[in-house]
Amino acid sequence: MPWDERTVKDCRIEFKFLSSKEGVNFSLLCDRFGISRKTGYKWLSRDEMEDLSRRPKTSPNRTPTKVEAIILETASTYPSWGARKLRTSLVRQGVQGVPAASTVVDILKRNGVTRSVQMPPGPWQRFEHLEPNHLWQMDFKGHFPTMEARCHPLTVLDDCSRFALCVQACQDQKTQTVKERLTGVFERYGLPWAILCDNGSPWGSESSHGLTPLGVWLMRLGVEVWHGRAYHPQTQGKLERFHRTFKLEALQGKVFRSFLECQNAFDSFRHIYNHVRPHQALDMQTPAVRYQTSQRSFPSELAQPEYDAGWEPRKVHHPGIVLFKGLRLDVPQALIGQTVGLQQVSEHLIDARFYTQTIKTIDLRDYKNV
């Protein structure tokens, strides 16, 4: 059969014209047009030859127009949120008639609202501490320029609840700057049992001389300092994921004129992240629902270290040595002026501890008598 380029409308018009001829065989005409007699009579009864809409007269299950408008408004307010987060947020606000997440996706597509498609994750295993404040994760987000100077965002995240304890705009990454910001965090939320950092200044590292003044200060507060494996950012995976959200929702496409403008944006993001944004890893709860402040208050004065029986206290002298059984043993220089505890654990090995944290294992065979 040759290709017929006529439209359906043209065929119907022609059929109606031919059927009006005197003496036409209606059944034969229908057969030639490839339609039934019932369809032929239907075409004759219609004045308009365009296809009629197949849309049902009523749609009882259709999402109400008002709810669609709320969905679109919320999607505009939080452009990086997916359908699940949007739906959970609206249900939590008490909006009636919120459809399933799949329907929210259809509503967004129908109105030209796009969302970035995330690839499904590969095999993984999540590790998290069971209680808030058992472990915090801390790092600087990559710095960026403002009209005043470069901004270095300092971020602190609770490992269990993902609660963002700190998102501070800093002018540098120096020890004193971090101490000042952490002091404010400790005064509001209390002390954690440990803080996980990466390697390098001002955090320190796992190397034998990697302790820094910031680490010493934290240890004097009774906060253990942990370090991730070098070149393995996945050790701080929760904070890395937080940084991705922070960049997308607070930094991307924005130019800041001042540090005050930065901090206002950071504070707004932190509130939304902690109290509004549903978190998929928390069964769509917000971090604030899981978090509670620490029972360990920030002290007004730092206590001096006390060591149990079997540990011999020794003062650290310049340039980072302690005297022990006629030997000059090396310890981190950041401990100069502090008192460490030493304990011989075998014929050749000595553990050095500062407060409750072992800072080094010393091999006596590496030293000569004084």
Image (cartoon, helix red, strand yellow):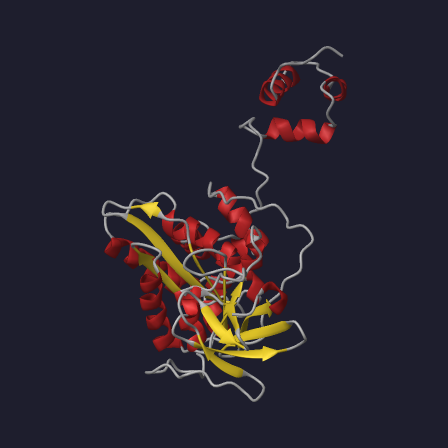
Q: Residue at x 56, y 61 (%)?
A: 280
Judged from this view, the residue extending furthest toward the bottom is: 309
Horizontal relation, residue 298 to residue 107: left or right: left
Q: Relative to residue 233, is residue 271 depicted above or below?
A: below
Residue 200 point in image, percent of width and height = 46, 55
Q: Up-down: is 3 above or below 199?
A: above
Extreme residue toward the front, this view: 370
Question: Residue at 61% across / 69% down in the picture?
Answer: 364
Identify which residue, 218 or 240, lies in the foreground: 218
- Residue nearer the viewer, 10 or 220: 220
Residue 163 location in percent, x, y?
46, 67
Q: Can you name the residue that lies furthest to the top here? A: 2
Residue 96 x %, y % = 48, 65
Whether residue 133 can be seen here: no
Position in image of residue 353 (x %, y %): 53, 76
Locate residue 175: give its quadrant.
bottom left
Identify the image quadrant of the N terminus. Answer: top right
Total of numbered circles in the picture? 0
- Relative to the observer, which residue lies in front, 355 or 84? 355
Residue 89 is at least partly visible in this image: yes
Q: Residue at x 50, y 56 (%)?
A: 199
Of 230 and 284, nearer the camera is: 230
